[in-house]
Image: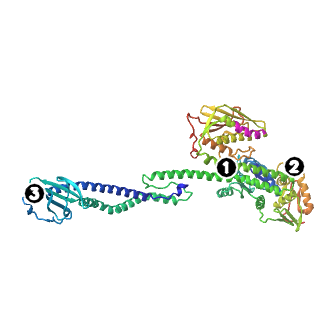
Amino acid sequence: MRLLVVEDDPLLGDGMKAGLEQAGFAADWVRDGMAAELALKTGSHAAVLLDLGLPRLAGLELLQRMRSRGNKTPVLIVTARDAVEDRIKGLDGGADDYVVKPFDLHELAARLRALIRRSAGEAAPVLRVGQVDLDPSVHRARFNGKPVELPPREFALLHALMLSAGRVLTREQLSERLYAWGEEVESNAIDVHVHHLRRKLAPQLIRTVRGVGYLMPRRQDG
Amino acid sequence: MAEAHRPAYSLKRRLLLALLAALAVVWLATAAYTYFDARHEINELLDAHLAQSASLIVAQVGHDLEEIELEHAPSGHEHARRVAFQIWERGTILRLHSANAPQARLSRRDDGYSSAVLDGRTWRVFSTWDARRRILVQVGERDETRREIAAGIAANLLAPLLVALPVLGLFVWLSIGRALRPLGRLGREVQARKADNFGALAALDAPDEVAPLVRSLNALFERVGRLVENERRFTADAAHELRTPLAALKTQAQVAQGASDDAARRHALENVIAGCDRATRLVEQLLTLARLDPDHAGRPAQALELAGLARQVLADLAPAALGRNVDIELAAGEGVSIMGHPELIAILLRNLVDNAVRYSPAGATVRVAVAPGVDGARVSVTDEGRGIAPEQRAKLGQRFYRIVGSGESGSGLGLSIVRRIAEIHAAKLAFDEPENGRGLRVTVAFQPRRAGEEGGEVKHPLRAR
C-alpha cells in the first residue's frame, strides 16, 4: 500500500517513511503543502499522513482543497496541536483520523490499516476472497487455511487485488500502489509478482484481462 | 523574610493608645497647672483674709483686753477652724489666744506675713503691732489647709477624666474601626482571590488613604497577570515545539528497533542522536529565552565596547563556521560603545552570527560590522544565504517561526532571543538585503549614549513588551 507522508520536519519525515516501509507500506515523503498537492494530483495513494503546520500551504487548507476536488483518499492528521478545538477542526475539515505527536509507530500503522480497510468498504481486519485470507496487521496470508510465505511486494500486490476484488486493476495502477517514487521498477515487475502469486496459491486465483490488467474475482470458481 | 516574623501590631490599638495617652497627658498637665494656679490665688485670697482678721482683732480688742472672751472658738467651718490667733501684750505676754493656737509665738516677726514651723506644722502668719496699745496681734493659718483646697480644685478637674477616658476610648475605638473597615474588606477580597484571578479590585468605596493602595494593587495584578499570561503562552509554545522533536526521536528509535539490516539501523540511530542534539539545543534556547526576563531586570547596564565583545564572540564561533566551510569577517570601528548588559549582547551577537553561518552555503562569508551610527551604534550581520522574502521578514523573531525549506532544523527561537535582548536595550532590529542583493542583513541599531549616563538606560523588561 502506498502512502503519502506530508511532514516538514526532516528527522521526523525520514523516520516516518522508514518506519512505514518497515510496516509493509510504500511511502512518498513530501515536505510542504504545495508538493503534497502536486503528489495527490498525480499519484495514487491509499492514505495520506498530514502534518498541519506546513510551509507554503497549510495542512487544513490542503485538506479542504483535496476534498473539494472530490479526492476521497483517507487522511490521517499527524500534528503537534493537541487542543480539542484543533482535533475537531481537523476531523470536521475532512480528516479521517487525528494523531498527536509524539506517536507510536505501530499504532500509526494500525490506524492506517484501519483507514485503508474502511475506505475499501471492509470492516473485518482479515480480508477474505475465496479461499484466501489476508491479515495485513501481521503480514500473514493463508490459502485454504494453510499459511503461505509471501515477500512484502507480493503480499502488497495480493492486498491491493483483494481490496479491489471484482475490479480490474491496470499494471500502472498496481505499480503506483506498490512502489514509492524513485524506486527502481522493472517494466515487467507486476507480471513477475503475479506469476509468483499464482504459483504459490492457485493458478486461477488471479485472472488476466488481456491488454488491460489483472483482477481477482469475488467468487472463486476454479 | 525577618520582617514577616515581627509580631504584628494593630493599627487600631496603636491609634487608640496614642490618642488616649495624649489626651491623658494634656489633661494631667491642665490639672497640674490648675493646681499651682489655684494655690497662688488661694494664697493671695487667704493672706488678705489673715490681714483682715488681724485688723478686725486689733479693732475689737478696744480699750480693755479683758473684754475679749478667752478661748473664743471660731465657728465650725472646716477650714476656718485651722485659723488661730494670739494677742501679745508688749509682744511678750500672751494675753489672749484661740483654742487651737499654740502657747509659743506663732512667728518671730512683729509685722507682715511670715511662715513658721511650730510642733512640726507649717503656719502662715500675719503679724500686726498696735503701737498705741502696745499689743501684737498674730493671726495664723495652717498651710495644709491651703494645699488641700488647691488639691481639691485640681481633683475636681481630674475626676471627669476617669469617666471620660473610657468613654472616649470606646468612641475612638468604634470610629477607627469604622474608618478602617474598607481596609478589612480589601484584605478579605484579596485573600478570597483565586491565584489565577488578575482582574482589578473593585474597591469603589475606598477612602482617599486606601485608594492609592488599591490602585497599586491593581497595577501589580495587571503586571503579574501579563507576566503569567506570557509564561503560560511560552510554556504552551515550548511544549508544543518539543512534540515534533520527540516524535522524531521516538519514530527513529522504533525504526532502529524494527530495522532488518544494519545500514538502516545505523541510519536510524544516527538520526536518534541528531534528534537528541536538536532537542537539547531547543531546550537550551528555551531556557535562555526564559531567563532573559527575571535575571537582568534589576541589573544596571554598563558601558560596553562593541568591537571587543564582537571579536570575543566571533572567536568562539569561528571553529564551527570553518568546519562548515564558512568564513567569518569582522569590520569593527574601535571605540564604539553602548550602554548594555555584556552577557546579553554576547548572546545577541552569538545568535545572529550562528544563524548567518547556518544559512550560508559552503564557501560563503559572514560579515559582521560594528560602526557608530547617526543614532548611536549599529551592529550588522550579513550572510550570503538565500535571503528572506520581504513579506516573511516581519515574522522573523516571532517565537518558533521557521523559514521553510531552509533544510535547517533550527529551534525557531534564536531570533526571538535576539529580538528580546534588543527590546531590553531599546535597540531596533531591522532585516534587509545587502547591497549586492544576495543573502540577508540583520542590523541592530542601539540608541545613543547620553552624556554622564551610568545606568538605568535599559528599559525594564516587563515594560518593554
The front one of B383 and B82 is B82
Q: Amino acid at mark 3?
A: Ala
Image quadrant holding the C terminus of chain B, namely top right
Marking on residue B432 = none
Magenta-highlighted residues: B311-322
| Colour setup of the view | rainbow
Residue for badge 1: B287
Q: Quadrant of residue A210?
A: bottom right
Q: Amino acid at mark 1?
A: Leu
User: How far across and down, in percent of the image, does residue B259 sit?
Assistant: 84, 56
SS for tag 1? Answer: helix
SS for tag 3? Answer: helix
The front one of A161 and B319 is B319
Q: Is residue A68 visible?
A: no
The front one of B85 and B177 is B85
Residue for badge 3: B59
**Between marks 2 and 3, how big is the CA–CA gap?**
160 Å
Q: What is the magenta segment's predominant secondary structure?
A: helix
**Between marks 1 and 2, how big is the CA–CA gap?**
47 Å
